[in-house]
Amino acid sequence: MSDRLPGFSTLAVHAGAQPDPTTGARATPIYQTTSFVFNDADHAASLFGLQAFGNIYTRIGNPTNAVLEERVAALEGGTAALAVASGHAAQVVVLQQLLQPSDEFIAARKLYGGSINQFTHAFKSFGWNVVWADPDDIASFERAVTPRTKAIFIESIANPAGSITDIEAISTVARKAGVPLIVDNTLASPYLIRPIDHGADIVVHSLTKFLGGHGNSLGGIIVDAGTFDWSTGGKYPMLSEPRPEYHGIRLQETFGNFAFAIACRVLGLRDLGPALSPFNAFMILTGIETLPLRMQKHCDNAKAVAEFLAGHPAVASVSYAGLASDKYNQLARKYAPKGAGAVFTFSLKGGYDAGVSLVSKLQLFSHLANVGDTRSLVIHPASTTHSQLDDAAKVKSGAGPDVVRLSIGIEDKEDLIADLEQALGA
Ligand SMILES: *Cc1c(COP(=O)(O)O)cnc(C)c1O
């Protein structure tokens, strides 16, 4: 046996999976069952008391989901992972382990529109207060830190404009503040950026996007880097204090560098309930096998389309970090040397009306609210995903009225350019 560490593409196909021990099935089976038989009463008691690992009930864990968890943990370089029903569920479960009512977390202002909504409105009802900072101004994160700050949340490649976040600089702020850095790595996927290598303590994903990759299954995942010490200063009682529901065990003391992933499972997922269907886990696992091939094609196509748009007379500006002239190009070269992702925005000289008209004339691009599909997608964020923001906040988050967002698929780039050309020219 070679002692070579497997490369990324090998892990994407194999990590976490082996032939099924009872049937020999080579693909990971869909364990479509709610519950699992115990060996005996002692076995059942030890599973419930967290003294042994094993399957109990699919809300808490499932063997198909476990393969997905191990695979994404391997691809991200984390110690453990937890799959959940959606990207939004991942965000709730993560923050529930970290925040008590009236605590704060700092979030980058440039985020997926749904996350801005979730943080501003839904989390307020839990007593969790979001404080916004500007990812282009690192000092704004430092200024936002207070004694109630429990976490910092950023996107590696930020929605909607595909801007690149300086993860290392913000991780330095998080370390100084003694709080974990959470990175939403949905738009990059671990093929382009591995946030843990740059100082992230927790990575979250919407598996719905590039990891699943085919626009057919919702899912989310939480990856524990195993880097954060939860015991300091009693700031994180869910992890450091005795848990009454598990005979007083302390999760950090018992589970060490994967205590956060355990907390998310046995306190978050068990009690809040957003479990991922094993069928969706199977679909997403199948998608991940081709992630390196798809992601490279997504990026190469996106660069070609961005270059075409940048040279078109009807286009006012293109915001794509893969263009040499882009303000995020230096950061893209550092963090995402294989490509700057496939989601970006551009604006038209004709403003709002021209944007709406373009969307209606495109034929190959689908007009819908998603990203990271094999198919190319288009949307006008100001009237849809970011419509809840006021005009100033729209501009600040990169979703001004003249902005159109593209998610470039894996079709032939010549066909995508031809479709844009006819829609812009007509
Ligand atoms: C889609 C998305 C989410 C939310 O994920 P769901 O699976 O739709 O719940 C979170 N962050 C980013 C960057 C996304 O694109």
Image (tube, rainbow, N blue to C red):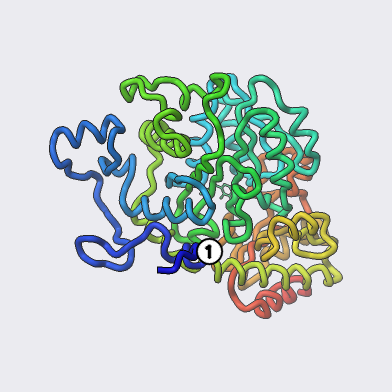
Q: Give the camera-side residue of 128 and 231.
A: 231
Looking at the picture, does residue 283 appear above or below residue 77? below
Whole-percent x and y of residue 273? 38, 37
- Whether residue 214 is visible, yes or no, is no
Looking at the picture, does residue 82 appear above or below residue 76? above
Q: Determine whether, in the image, residue 185 is placed left or right of residue 51.
A: right
Q: Tell me if the residue at label 1 has its CB under 8 Å from ligand 1.
A: no
Looking at the picture, does residue 339 appear above or below residue 392? below
Residue indicated by mark 1: 8
SS class of the residue under badge 1?
helix
Whole-percent x and y of residue 201? 58, 40
Q: Quadrant of the N terminus?
A: bottom left
Q: Quadrant of the C terminus?
A: bottom right
Whole-percent x and y of residue 152? 64, 35
Q: Determine whether, in the image, residue 88 is placed left or right of residue 32.
A: right
How many numbered marks have been drawn onto this rendered protein structure?
1
Q: Residue at x 63, y 46 (%)?
A: 112
Q: Give the camera-side residue of 241 and 364.
A: 241
Q: Give the camera-side residue of 271 and 56.
A: 56
Q: Residue at x 53, y 22 (%)?
A: 100
Q: Determine whether, in the image, residue 198 is placed left or right of residue 61.
A: right
- Whether residue 413 is visible, yes or no, is yes
The amino acid sitting under disc 1 is Phe
Q: Quadrant of residue 299?
A: bottom right
Looking at the picture, does residue 95 appear above or below residue 217? above
Q: Residue at x 77, y 50 (%)?
A: 401
Is disc 1 surrounded by few (<14), some (14 to 19) or many (20+) residues within 10 Å? some
Q: Quadrant of residue 425?
A: bottom right
